[in-house]
Image: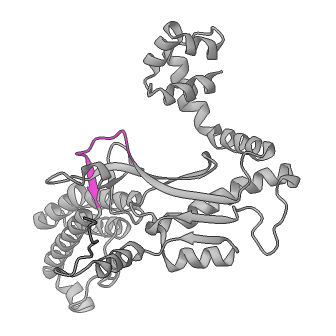
Amino acid sequence: MMLKVLVYAYTQRVYSSRQIAKALRENVNFMWLSGGNRPDFRTINAFRGEKMKGVIEAVFTSVLELLVEEGYVKLENYFVDGSKVEANANRHKVVWAKSRAKYQERLREKVKGLLKEIEAVNEAENEEYGDNDLEELGGGGEIDAEKLEKKIAELNQRLKEKPEDKKLAKAVKVMEKDYLPRQKRYEEQERKLAGRSSYSKTDEDATFFRMKEDRGAEKPLPKPAYNVQTGTEGQFVVGFSLHQRAGDTACLIPHLEGVKANLSSIARRKPDLFPQPEGQSRYLPQNISADAGYGSEENYAYCEEHHLGNYVKYNTFHREQQKQSQTRTHPQGHLPHRELAL
């Protein structure tokens, strides 16, 4: 019942749990779907946040199984496209990968400079290490939080032996209270970025994209969003996937792998639904159709490897079509004409 109510609410652009609860009391369509039940907004939130997230994939697979079984979906022609959906996140709280790398490099230079200043006053270590960085910092390699913690521990031990060394005490304090926490923060940001160009501080899974609706803006600002890939057949959604990259090209193979996983789980329960076409992958649609945004050598190789009908335009298709149309236009002064009957 709760799933039916939520799906219907989303189709009516009602997303707030309080608005859904109100509709269950006032709207006859919601009343009919709920069978007269009136869960409050807390119950709706709990179902949506705790239970539905864990079963949404299973529910979708069950619906797909029913569509295949009834013959509505035959897995012949699969049309895939992507849409950028803005995340419910603050547009102004963002971590940019380039800025993070720049600030981290500055911090590393400060740490190296401070350590060189400390070592300059210790003649014994200068004789032992010469002009090289200390081994604890990787012999000139990149400084990370673990190496910095080891160095701070070493300096603290030296400070116990020379408590009157105020310069050393000040340096250790700066490293402990400022440099080390910043280094840990930058490393944590790098882990969350996971190769992306950015992420939102209020929704760390969202990446900042330029949205299609902002193309005409004078200064379009990136927004936190997701790239949702959807595949259909006969106006039914057969597969969907969520991605953190703006371009569609690199999303096709992971998307089709997700479709294959869903269809495989159905085939394990009902193998008769998926007769094996000769020389073709059993758990993928026979033909893949997509626009030029998906054209790449990797995607064509994947389709060939799995013996899929490839109807994916290559990425320069429209540019070539435009050039051909320009060459077909008539030069000025030589326009075609028809003789008018007088």
The residue lying toward the viewer, choosing from 159 and 80, is 80
Q: Position of residue 188 (x, y in %)?
A: 37, 57
Q: Which residues are magenta?
A: 85-96
Q: Quadrant of residue 145?
A: bottom left
The picture places residue 87, in percent across and down from the top left corner, at 37, 43
**Of residues 130 and 66, which is closer to you in this image?**
66
Which residue lies most toward the front here? 342
Residue 90 on the magenta segment: yes
Number of marks:
0
Q: What residue is at 73 percent from the left and 43 percent from the top?
A: 67
Q: For the view shown, which residue lies furthest in the right direction?
A: 272
| Location of the C terminus (image quadrant) | bottom left
The percent position of residue 294, horizontal first and vertical second, equals 48, 68
Residue positioned 58% across, 37% down in the render: 53
Rendered residue at 62%/39% (across/down): 56
Q: How is the image coloured?
A: one colour
